[in-house]
Image (tube, grey):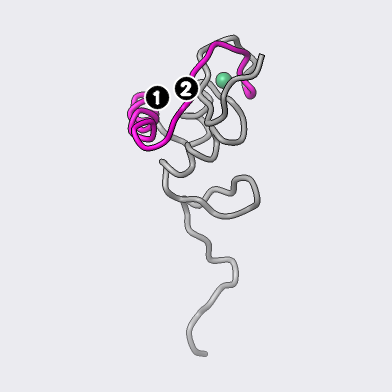
Amino acid sequence: MGLRTSPWTVSRCAIHVGRGRPVSDPAELITLLMLERPLCLDCISDQANLSSEDTKRRVETIGRTIEIHAGEDRCGSCGRFRTLFSLRPFER
Ligand SMILES: [Zn+2]
């Protein structure tokens, strides 16, 4: 028979975020994570599957293009009180 095709062929590193759009670019994924809710660096690196060093560098790089808000609060994911990063201003 002809070519073996599978309807389930999906990029290995595609991660579904938000509206189910596959995201494979780490910088884009980090941006989306920070847009969704304020997260600490550990949780961002966890969810983006990057080392914390790599995550920190990427957050800094993204911060040169778009404004990233940093503030002390309870992390939306791990619940610990830490420095969080968000694309929205922190509301008190
Ligand atoms: Zn966290």
Residue 23 image position (x, y, % from top left): 50, 51
The mark total stands at 2
Q: Amino acid at mark 2?
A: Leu
Q: Residues within 10 Å of mark 2 (few under 14, many from 20)?
A: many
- Circle 2 — which element? helix
Instruction: Report if the beta carbon of the residue with label 2 is closer than 8 angstroms to ligand 1.
Output: yes
Q: Are marks 2 and 1 in contact (CB under 8 Å)?
A: yes
Q: Residue at image x 53%, y 27%?
A: 86
Residue matched to label 1: 52
Query: Ligand 1 sits in which quadrant?
Result: top right
Please state which of residues 24 and 7 is positioned toward the viewer in this rendering.
24
Q: Residue at image x 66%, y 13%?
A: 92
Q: Residues within 10 Å of mark 1 (few under 14, many from 20)?
A: some
Above-or-below relation of 23 to 45 = below
Residue matched to label 2: 41
Q: Residue at image x 56%, y 35%?
A: 35
Mark sitting on residue 29: none
The residues colored magenta run 52-77
Q: Quadrant of residue 21?
A: bottom right
Instruction: Report if the beta carbon of the residue with label 1 is closer than 8 angstroms to ligand 1.
Output: no
- Pick whichever of labels 2 and 1 is earlier in the sequence: 2
Rounded to the nearest angstrom, the CA distance separating label 2 from label 1 is 7 Å
